[in-house]
Image (cartoon, grey):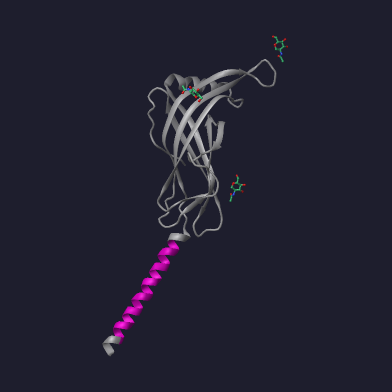
Amino acid sequence: MMTGRIKEETAGCCCILGALTLVITLSAAYAFVVPVVVTVDDAALTRLDLAAAPAPDGNNGTVPSLAINLSLAVAVRNRNWAMSAWLPAPPVGELRFRGVPFARGWLPVAPRAWRPHRIRARRTEMYRVSSEIEGVLMAGLGSDGVDEFARESAAGVFQLELVVSGEVRYQAHLHRRNFSASCPLKLSLSTGAFARVRCT
Ligand SMILES: *[C@@H]1O[C@H](CO)[C@@H](O)[C@H](O)[C@H]1NC(C)=O
Ligand SMILES: *[C@@H]1O[C@H](CO)[C@@H](O)[C@H](O)[C@H]1NC(C)=O
Ligand SMILES: *[C@@H]1O[C@H](CO)[C@@H](O)[C@H](O)[C@H]1NC(C)=O
């Protein structure tokens, strides 16, 4: 009888310790949010031109006009090991040259339409983005920007920036949080070579 009771007590004690450990572990897993990480895993640039277009204000001046064909594979990774992350709306991508934005839009998950979706713990969601823009006026690009474009064109490597921003809600957390990540892209028309970029 004695031994039996001692065993029971020990077992009960272990149970409480085990439950306590579980509670602490789960609290740690759900209390602390590890923010999503954005990377650009692949890119293909087939066209990038800068031309002079007549200024829209009717003066005789000209404004730089950019044409681009670019497709990107953007990954959003949920690094939490227990919590899912929900994106209630599609993330927005903005492309910039020398800080001047020239394209802004959703990052769609082709081919299905967007609906709030879940990135499970430790999983990655891929977004494919393509921009085919015939001519967008870049009034903010001064003559130094035009010179820089010419230099990069001669060197064969263009430096663009992709800014990805959106809202995310983590499991067990009520509030949505904003995230924004800047991805410096180095793109070559001729070789098509691209090294994966981690956005910050
Ligand atoms: C760029 O995209 C346009 C529109 O889709 C297409 O007509 C054109 O052939 C493309 N050019 C290159 C060089 O890929
Ligand atoms: C634009 O150029 C035309 C012809 O050269 C000239 O008559 C006109 O005054 C100019 N307009 C402006 C706003 O400079
Ligand atoms: C998130 O961004 C949106 C739009 O830019 C803004 O209206 C909202 O206040 C931001 N929310 C937080 C929590 O920063």
Give the extent of the magenta segment.
5-28
The mark total stands at 0
| 80, above or below 44, in the image | below
Q: Residue furthest bottom?
A: 1
- The quadrant of the rendering that contains the N terminus is bottom left
Where residue 25 appears, as percent x and y from the top left, is: 40, 64
Where residue 110 appears, as percent x and y from the top left, is: 48, 39
Where residue 150 appears, as percent x and y from the top left, is: 49, 19
Residue closer to the observer: 158 or 71 = 71
Q: Is residue 23 magenta?
A: yes
Magenta-highlighted stretch: main secondary structure?
A: helix
| 36, above or below 19, in the image | above
Instruction: Give the residue drawn at x 54%, y 51%.
Output: 177
Q: Is residue 46 magenta?
A: no
Image position of 6 (left or right of 74): left
Where residue 127 appears, as percent x and y from the top left, is: 46, 40
